[in-house]
Image: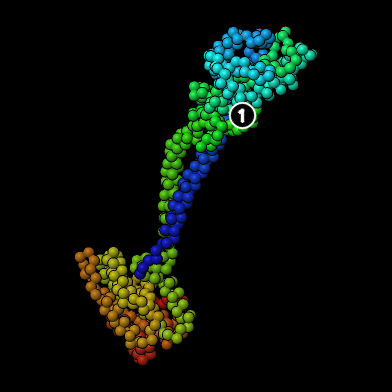
Amino acid sequence: MHRAKPSRIVTSIASIFVAFAVLVVGFIISSLFVLDVASKSANELKLDADQRAVSGLVSREIEDLSQRQSEVAWWDTSVVALSDGVDRTFFADAMLGWFPKEYGIDRSLLMSPDHQVLLHADGEEFTPDAPAQSFAAQTMDLVRQAQAKYIEQRVGKAGAFWIEGDPVRDDPVLYVYDIRRIDGEIGIVVAQAIVPDGEMVLPDGPAHILVSFRPFTPARMAAYQTEIELADFDIRLTPPLDGENVIELSSGLSNQTIYASWVSELPSHGIWAKSAPALALMLAVIAFVMLGVTIAYARLVYRTRKAEARNRYLAGHDALTGLPNRNRFELALKRDIGRNYLKKCAVLCVDLDRFKPVNDTYGHHAGDQVLRVVARRIHDVIGDLGMVARLGGDEFIALLHDAAHKDEVMMLCDRLIESVCQKISFEGHEFYVGASVGVAWWPDDGHSADMVVRRADQALYRAKELGRGRAVQAADLENDHDYTPGFAGHTLLA
């Protein structure tokens, strides 16, 4: 009488919720993947923009320093100031006034054609020989290269030479630059020959060289940071510890690698910060909607599966008692006989006595309760020995799989009748019903399922004729001279 558990319902609902979880997890993973790709792309674009800004800044500084220096180095007045010795007053105005105060040139050096230090300015004063010689030694390669470029680019006749075009803006340029360390400070060094810009000409031979130095002081680095909007901007000759935001540049003449580093505020931080709340809200809404749909669909599947399971159950069971029905019993009997076992099996046809008065007097509810109680009692008596089914009304039938000992079967029938006859209580009333049993054996009483059931049915009919409340074997009918063959109307098989 145990109903089969609808495991397919549990499996179906579990599958629905697993699918829901997979969809939610898939949405989360896909969203995070899109955000990650967008963040990395934004970071790459930002890094590329930062690199171009840093490279442009360094290039502009070199051009600016070259242009500022050229305002003195490319000038007829400067050529005149060197035509008869060195006009110290003129160069003091330029090297101690314009350069440090207006042009951002902290140190400058005036070299003679034969590489002798003529003037060395450090800030707003000319320094003695030792610092001047040190500065000259550290920039001598630029001085030589600047003189070589002048010789290469000059035009004119012997004793009268000049430079065509703008020494800074035209190609090739006249100046030479390098980024290097001078007396412990890293900065830009520019060297250019002093040439006329108008009517003046130069004699044959090397020219005077003007050298300018603009170091990367903390104040200038702070101004650079503000200009390009990059934090912790720095220019160094050695790689920084954190090489993520670094660009490598050529120093210039010496072709050494210099490193410009900075700290960027990566756009990915903003993307995640701004997207996370919206993503969480969207995920919550989608999860809520999907969960609602999933629950609704799960309920539908549950009801459908439950109905299917119920229909499958009812196809083989009696709805009132939960016992197997006629069809299931028929299949079980045919299966046992079809196996052609050597063991005998027995069929018990059971019909209740005194049931109709209960049903007619107290109604169908009382009758249904009596049938449920009786079905349970018959099932408990048969137990694991076989199978009990309800044929309809107050008619039951049982199949005993191993029934070789007929005396034991008849004793079982007596216990069955005794159990059925026990008191049944319902809504304050007490009912007493009985049972009659007809027994037939296979293959002794019939070689087919139909014949065995007919013989058991005939035995039941005889039991009722003899006064009810008893069990009769089909074999006893052969020796009963008072028995007239008949049927109780319980035929199972056609």
Farthest-out residue, front: 129
Q: Residues within 10 Å of mark 1 (few under 14, many from 20)?
A: some
Q: Amino acid at mark 1?
A: Ser
Tell me residue 93's x, y (percent): 57, 9
Q: Is residue 90 above or below residue 142?
A: above
456 or 42, which is in the foreground? Answer: 42
Residue at which label 1 appears: 251
Coloration of the structure image: rainbow
Corner quadrant of residue 211: top right
Whether 494 is drawn above or below 59: the answer is below
Residue 442: x and y in percent read 42, 84
Counting from the top left corner in percent of width and height, residue 212 is at: 60, 19
Q: Residue at x 45, y 37 (%)?
A: 276
* Tag count: 1
**Residue nearest the viewer, comparing 93 with 235:** 93
Which residue is more in the foreground, 43 or 167?
167
Q: Is residue 289 above or below residue 407?
A: above
In this orientation, does residue 398 appear? no
Q: Nearer the viewer, residue 124 or 331?
A: 124
Q: Residue at x 73, y 15 (%)?
A: 163
Residue at the (52%, 42%) spot, across then down: 33
Q: Which image quadrant: the N terminus?
A: bottom left
- Mark yes or no: residue 366 visible: yes
